[in-house]
Structure formats: structure tokens, C-alpha cells
Amino acid sequence: MTTLYSEQDGFNSLVEASPMPTAIYKGMNMIISAANQAMLDLWGKTTHVIGMPLIEGVPELKNQPFLGILEEVFETGETYYSKESPADLVVDGTLQTFYFTFTYKPLKNDNGETIAIINTAAHLTELVAARKQIADTQERLTFALISAEIGTWDLDPINNIVNWDARCRELFGFAKDGEIKYGDVLSCIHQDDVEVVNKAVLQAIDPNAEGQYDIKYRTLSKENHILRWVHCKGKAYFNDDGIAYRFAGIAQDITNEIAADRREQQLLTLIDNNADHMTVADLKGNVIYMNKASRLMLGVDLAADVTKLSAKDFYTPNELDRVQNHIIKEIDPVKGWQGNISLLNFTTKDVIPCRVSYLLIKDPATGEVIGRGATARDLRPEISAKAEVEKMASIVGSSEDFCNYCDTNGNTVYINPSGRELIGISEENVPKSNLFDYHSDSSNEKIKNEILPLLFSKGRWSGELELIHQETKEIIPIHKQLYMIREEITNIPVAIAGIARDLRPELNVRKILADKNAALQSVVNELEFLANTVPSVVWTSGPDGNLDYINQRWFDQTGKSNEETLGARWMESVHPDDVSLAEKAWKISLETGAPYEIEFRCLDKFNNYRWYLVRAMPLKDAEGKIVKWYGTNNDVHHQKELEKQKDNFLGIASHELKTPVTSLKAYAQVMESMFKRSGDFKNADLLGKMNKQVDRLTNLISDLLDVTKINSGRLQFNNAEFDFNEMVEEVIEDVQRTSFKHIIKKELNFNKTIYGDRDRICQVVTNLLTNAVKYSPEANEVVIYTEDAHDIVKVCVQDYGIGISPDLQDHVFEQFYRVSGNREHTFPGLGLGLYISSEIVKRLGGKIWVNSVQGKGSTFGFTIPIMMD
Ligand code: ADP
């Protein structure tokens, strides 16, 4: 070290002792007169620079401002302070920038002239670098936050104040300035999310909890009602007392992200639920994605992780070879590849013919191919539909009906072989023909004006048309059905399909039928003529009883029209007193199928009622079901009149006869007793016989009178209670008295009184007993039984006489009926006894019957209710 003066030495030792880098520059040339080790280190120099001008010792300072500043300090004598200034220095052989805070302070002599400058410096490079780094980081962070649109927030939970940056304010819809309280924040949160946010915040600032905060929620700006999704993350800081003094974090607008997420979700849902089969694989053939339809078709469990599968598993070996070695190479980057491939069901190993489209998937950023997408359509339904169509086509082709197909203008597309034959057109002429070529003019008019409009509006038509044979020009009547065919999606009419039946065979049949009908009609006419010639009214009815035909005689007799008669209207002509009976009997016959036979009066065209005997019989089919009723009405009015006259006559005659016979009986009795008294027993006996004959005559007359009374409905009944047994005993006694040949045996088991007309019942028992005696001349025994059958008394009279043949048994109860035969005259009688008896029994509510074997005998029986209703 060069010593200038003692003062200088003092300085130098000061410099050396200084902990800070210090140097002294002397004179205008800035000779480094002193520099401590710290300064030398700073400069990266050794002590050899001491004594050199600064510019030589530290040559890199050239072109840096320091020398200029030093000169100025030297000249002005004013101290220069610099803060954190950079200086480029060669240290360790390389030029580096260092930062210093330094001072250039002039050292003056007593005259106040600057003689030297003392330079102290503090090395701040590390500090500056650290600060710069912080600033840079800060800047980068801010930049990142801004570019990521992330806002920061800082909550002071103690004072409840939130510090928000501009972005955060924007996200929550707050004004740019002004204080924000935590409550204000909550009010900007979507009401559905407030609770969950509040909870999350409270949990975050809870010292016992994790202190982490990570939540997504919606904000609703009060200002402009914009809804945003924000993602907030934060952390709470706690002091030693465990109180959160700070809760800070970031908020990010994730509205678009959420929307994108949703869109992606929707897209995925769409793809997943798409009916098309979609698969994505990477370039190595590993499956990445497979939608639901694809999984179902290819037999992959819906829950299975498809990334474990290889696309290879879904091809038949042949197809795999084709795909790997040909198709993959042929996939066009833009158009992809389309074609048919047989895929394989993973589970069932079924081969599925498919229409497949491959496309290359590129990285949107780089354009590099990263995978392959495939969509597949199961062709099986199409194949079976095609098979169906082919089947249909073969049916149509082989159909015997005329089938054709044309466009909406009538240009023929197809006519089946039967159709071509029907209209005489060759296959090659079919496409050249038009609907209007092979129909008759009248049919063409109809097609144009009527059928086509209907086809367009309603879609179908059917009816009769005429075809023209193209060669023979024969007109062929057909029954045609036409259908409009519409495009499936647009519903636009595209074609007309038709099917027709040749009507000629049918028309022939119709003609034959018409001829047969005409023949039948003439038979019907003849029958009707016949029906009209018979003297009776002839009619027919359905099984329901409604008249469907009646002959002319009815109209002649009644003057009624068809409408006034058919159905059930004939009843309007029936006498009001007879109508219910007629109707009832008709109903019974209709229900049971029993023949209908009844007499009733009908009004004739002169307004008089005439009696008719009406009979009807059912015609039954093979199963015995009634198909029709055939009936006749015979005019029995005259007969009835005669019967009436006869009854009148009989009434009058028997009445007139009764008086003289009664007198005759009285005289005969008187004379008999006179002869007996005079002892003329011979004459008395004769008169006794006469008396008996008069009794018979009286009985005959009384029978006749009874019949006339019955026929005119005047038969009187004097009902009273009486002892039945006693009455029977009396009759037995009377009859026994008339015949000594027969012994009347009795088995009387009925011992009650009954209510009825004693005389009339007595008349019945007498009649049966006398007949039994009369018609068993060879026998000597007759038996009478009585029996108590609950509320009924039953009487049977049995004889061992001539009997009655079975076919005649029913008739014996008819008026004047007598079993004819050579013995007719052997057994006198009028044939009235049984008739009267049956009428009496019927009137008393009982029944009468006969069981008889010809030549062996008969049993006649009757019942009567004990008490009449
Ligand atoms: P009548 O005896 O006066 O002829 P009825 O009315 O009593 O009349 O009998 C009718 C007919 O029935 C008789 O003519 C007879 O032919 C037959 N008849 C009645 N009772 C008997 C009987 N017990 N045995 C056989 N025939 C009988």
C-alpha cells in the first residue's frame, strides 16, 4: 500500500477495517488508493488493482455510469447515494450483474477541495434477486389467475369482512369497490346452495376440522341476474388460540365447464341410448367405449369394463383377417369405410351380419389419428324382412289373382303372371303400359273421377271394374282392391298396388244361380197358386212365431193387407174374447213344438166375427230344431152355427120331452100301484118294466140336457161339504140293485168329507159303475176303489169286460163318442156319460182317465181335490 500522508493511512486502515466493501479513489483519475478485501471480492479482483486508476483496475466499468458519477462527485463535492443499482463486473472470469447500494462520498482538504472519494457499497444482489423472483412469481401467479379467470378471496372471520379481487366481485355480481361482508356473499349464492356453502365455510373455519374448503355452487348476480357456477377452494389459518383469523382461497367460474360437462353427459347419454351400435377402439384394437346397443348386440354385459376387451373378440376369424389386413388400411381419413362385416356375439358366438361404418378419430389439436370408431347396424331384421318381401313376391307371383303395381300416374311397374295372362300382355310390355291402357273406357272414367281421388284421400278402394284383353279385346269384369302406398317417413304417395279377381266364373255361377232362382220362383209361384186355391187360409211363420207368409184367401176374407197381418199383427183381427187364449196356446206351441190347434173368431171384411179352426205344425231340421211353422185356418163358422142349432134343438127337445116323460112316469107309477092293489100282478109287473124304461128315458133326457148346459156353459154346481164314502155306498147300492149278475166289490179307503157338488160327483161314480157293469156282460164282478191321496180323492172302477183298444181310449171322453163295432147295438147309449163325467171332473179341478186292455177289461179313474180352490 502506498502511503500519501498520515491521514491517508488512517483512512486506509479505516477502509480495511470496514465490514462493508469500501474503497477510496484519489484524484480526478480515480486512483484506487485503498480497497478492502470485501470490495476486492465484490469486484472479483486482487490487491494488485490498488494504485491503479479505477478504469484500469476494474476495466468492465467502462461504458457503465459509475466513472461519470464519480467525476461529478469530484467536481461538485456532493455525496452520491445509489440504491440497488446494477453493476456488471467480471467475477470468476465471467461478466455478471450485481446489485449494490453504494455511496460516493468526497473527501475534502481543509480548503474544502475534493481530493478523494470514498466508496462504500452493500452487496444486495441476492436480496434483489430474491425480491425479483418473488415479484416474478407474483406476476406469473397474477397472470395465471387472470388468464384462468380465477378470483381470489380472503375472509377475515373475526371481523366478518371479505377481501375480494375484481374477478371474485364479478363472479358474485358485486360492485368493483366497497366493503363486503360475509352475509353479502351468502345473499349472492343461489338459494338452493346457500345452506351447503354456509356449512362448508363453518366446517373450514372449525379448528377441530380439516380446515380445507372445496366446493362447487351457483351464484346469482343481484345486478344482472346472471347465474354462474363457481368452484371455490380455500384454507383457514388459525392462531395459537385455535381461532381462524384468515380464511382465503380462490374462486373459479366453472359455468362453461359444467355446461360442457352436461353437454358431454347428454351426448354420452344420447350415444349410449342410441339404437345404433357404436364402438370406439384405440389403434391397437383395445376397446375404449361401447354403447348399450352395441353391448346388447355383441353380448357384452352392460356393467362390464369394455376397456379390458379387444375389438378382435367381435369378429369371426375370416372377418378378423379381412378387417386387420384390408379394411383398416382402406379407411379413408375423411369418408371412413362402409361395408358389410359379420360380427360375433361375445357370449353366444352367434354370427351377426352387420352394416359397419369405420371412421378414424383424430386428436383435435394435432390431427394425429388416435383411434377408430365403428357404428354397426344389425342386418338380420333387414335380411328377414327381405326374405319376407321375397316370400311375398313369390306369393304375389304365383297368385292366381291379378296383382299389379304402378306409380301414381298409372305407369305400370309390375303385373304378376296371372295378371299378364288375364289381360294378354307380355312381360316386356309391362313397363311400357299404363293403368288406363288395360281398363275399359267406362272403368277409366271411374278410375279418373272417382277412384284416384279416393285413393289419395282414403288410401284404399274396392269395387268392380272392367279389364280389356289386349289381344282379343274381350271385356273382363273384375272385382278390384286398390291401395295407395306411401313413403314411410314423408307419407308422400308413391305407388298404387292392386289385386283383382276375375269375376267371370262368379258371374257364371251368379247366372246359374239366377236361373235356379227363377226356376225356384216359378215353383214357389205354383205353390202359392196352390195355396191360394185351397179353401183354407194357409200361412207360415218363423220359429219365433211371426207370420212371414199368408195366402190370398186371408186377404179375401179379412180385407187386410200384408202389413196388417204379417208378424204378430194377425192377432188384431182375433176376437177380443179369444185373443188371450189364442196367444197363450201359440206361445206354448212355440216353446214346446207341440202342434197348435185352437178355434177362435176373426173379423171378416164385413166386420163380422167368424169361427176358424186354426192348426199349425212345426217343420224341423235334422237336429230337431224348428225351422218353420205351417198353419191353416179353416172356416168352421157354419159348422159352429149348426152345432149351436143342434144344441139349441137338443136343449129345447130335451126340455120339452122332460115334462111329458115326468107325467108318464107319474101315471105309470100310479097305475103300477093300482094294479098291485087290485092283485093284477102281471100288469103291475108290465108297468114296473115300463117304469124302468121311463127311468132310462129320463136319464137319457137328463144327459142330453146336461150336454146342452155344458155346451152353453150353463152347467150349475151346488157345492157343499159332504161325506164322500156315504155317497159312494149309496151309488153302489143303487147300481147293485139294477144288476144281480155282477157283484160290486168295494175297497173304500177314503173316509173324509169333501167340498163339491154331491149330485154331480154321484153322477160320475154312477156313470163309471153302470158302464163297468154294462160293458162286462160276461163277467160277474166289478170293483170300486177309493183312495186318500193327500188333498185329493182318487176313485177307480175296474171291470173285466170288453175293454177298449188303445187308439180309441182317448176318444171315449168325447161328446157322442161310442166305440163302434159289431156290438154297438148290444150296448145301448148315447155316448154322453163319459163326456159329462169328464166335464164335471174338469170343472171340479180333477182329472179323469182310462186304462184298458181290449178283451180283458177297463179301469176308469178320476181324482178330485178335497177342497176346491
Ligand atoms: P154310452 O155308454 O152311453 O155309450 P159313455 O159316454 O158312457 O156312453 O161311453 C162312451 C163309450 O165308451 C161307450 O160307448 C163305450 O164304447 C165305451 N165305454 C165306456 N165305458 C166302458 C167300459 N167300462 N168298458 C168298455 N167300453 C166302455
Image: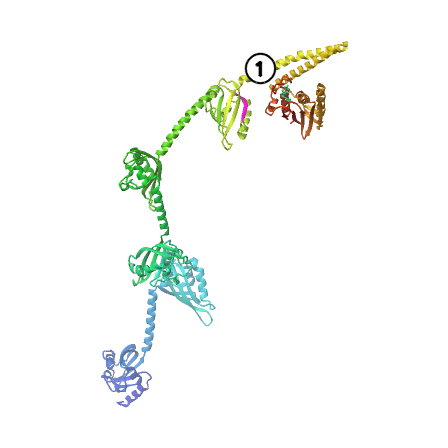
Looking at the rendering, the quadrant in which ligand 1 lies is top right
Residue labelled 1 has its Cβ within 8 Å of some atom of ligand 1? no
Horizontal side, residue 126 vs residue 239: left or right: left
State the residue in front, 101 or 775: 775
> Is residue 599 magenta-colored?
yes
Q: Is residue 850 visible?
A: no
On screen, 456 above or below 349? above
Q: Mark 1 sits on what residue?
A: 645
Q: Position of residue 611 (x, y in %)?
A: 53, 19
State the residue in front, 369 or 187: 369
Element type at mark 1: helix
Q: Position of residue 284 (x, y in %)?
A: 34, 63
| Quarter in which the C terminus is drawn | top right
> Is residue 193 magenta-colored?
no
- The amino acid on which the numbered mark 1 sits, given as a three-letter code, is Gln
Tell me where the magenta segment starts and ends, as one range. Answer: 595-602
Q: For residue 466, which quarter of the picture?
A: top left
